Image (cartoon, helix red, strand yellow):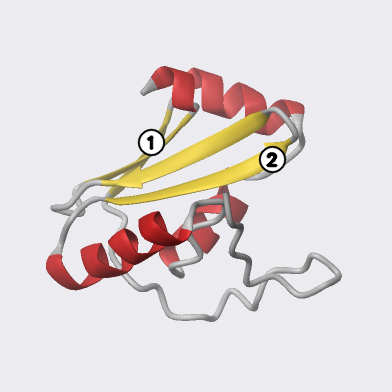
């Protein structure tokens, strides 16, 4: 997969003052996602802030384009973030923007 990142070379995310690109609705997370984030000492807010700024993480170009279209047409937005070599967190915001879920791919 082609990775897309908006972080600077030092690994620092852009300022949090960047305007969100869409509404998240209610934010929820599965137990597996929360456990993985805790194990790797990553705040869920770090990934959520990337997702809402339209930094969709580690997805291919076709999925990136699908997400950009979803921003315009109100469809589901899916981001993927590799937090360790063998651990990926998905963030899915539903098309009606009522809920955003953090989960492991195995929990889908």
User: Which residue is disc 1 drawn over?
Assistant: 28
Q: Is residue 76 left or right of residue 44?
A: left
Q: Is residue 49 left or right of residue 42?
A: left
How many numbered marks have been drawn onto this rendered protein structure? 2
Q: Is residue 30 left or right of residue 82?
A: left
Q: Secondary structure at mark 1?
A: strand
Q: Which label sits on residue 59?
A: none
Q: In the rendered view, would you say 62 is above or below 14?
A: above
Please name the residue shown 34% across and 66% down the image.
65
Taking depth in this image into account, of 78 and 102 the one nearest to the observer is: 78
Looking at the picture, how far across and down is residue 36, in whole percent? Answer: 65, 26
Looking at the picture, how far across and down is residue 102, in whole percent? Answer: 44, 37
User: Which residue is disc 2 drawn over?
Assistant: 83
Looking at the picture, how far across and down is residue 97, in whole percent? Answer: 20, 54
Please name the residue shown 65% across and 45% down the image.
43
Badge nearest the viewer, 1 or 2: 2
Please name the residue shown 65% across and 76% down the image.
14
Please name the residue shown 48% across and 54% down the image.
60
Residue 103: quarter of image: top left
Q: In the orientation shown, which residue stands out farthest toward the right? A: 10
Q: Tell me how far mark 1 sits from mark 2, CA to CA.
A: 18 Å
Circle 2 crowding by C-alpha within 10 Å: few under 14, some 14–19, many from 20: some
Mark 1 vs 2, N-terminal side: 1
Looking at the picture, how far across and down is residue 59, in whole percent? Answer: 50, 52
**Split into 4 quadrants, where in the image is the C terminus?**
top left
Q: Secondary structure at mark 2?
A: strand
């Amino acid at each position: 997969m082609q990775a897309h990142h908006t972080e600077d070379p030092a690994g620092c995310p852009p300022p949090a003052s960047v305007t969100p690109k869409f509404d998240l609705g209610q934010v929820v997370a599965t137990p597996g996602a929360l456990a993985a984030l805790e194990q790797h000492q990553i705040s869920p807010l770090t990934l959520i802030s990337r997702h809402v700024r339209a930094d969709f993480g580690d997805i291919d170009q076709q999925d990136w384009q699908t997400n950009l279209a979803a921003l315009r047409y109100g469809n589901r937005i899916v981001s993927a973030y590799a937090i360790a070599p063998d651990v990926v967190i998905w963030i899915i915001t539903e098309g009606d923007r009522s809920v955003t879920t953090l989960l492991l791919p195995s929990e889908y």
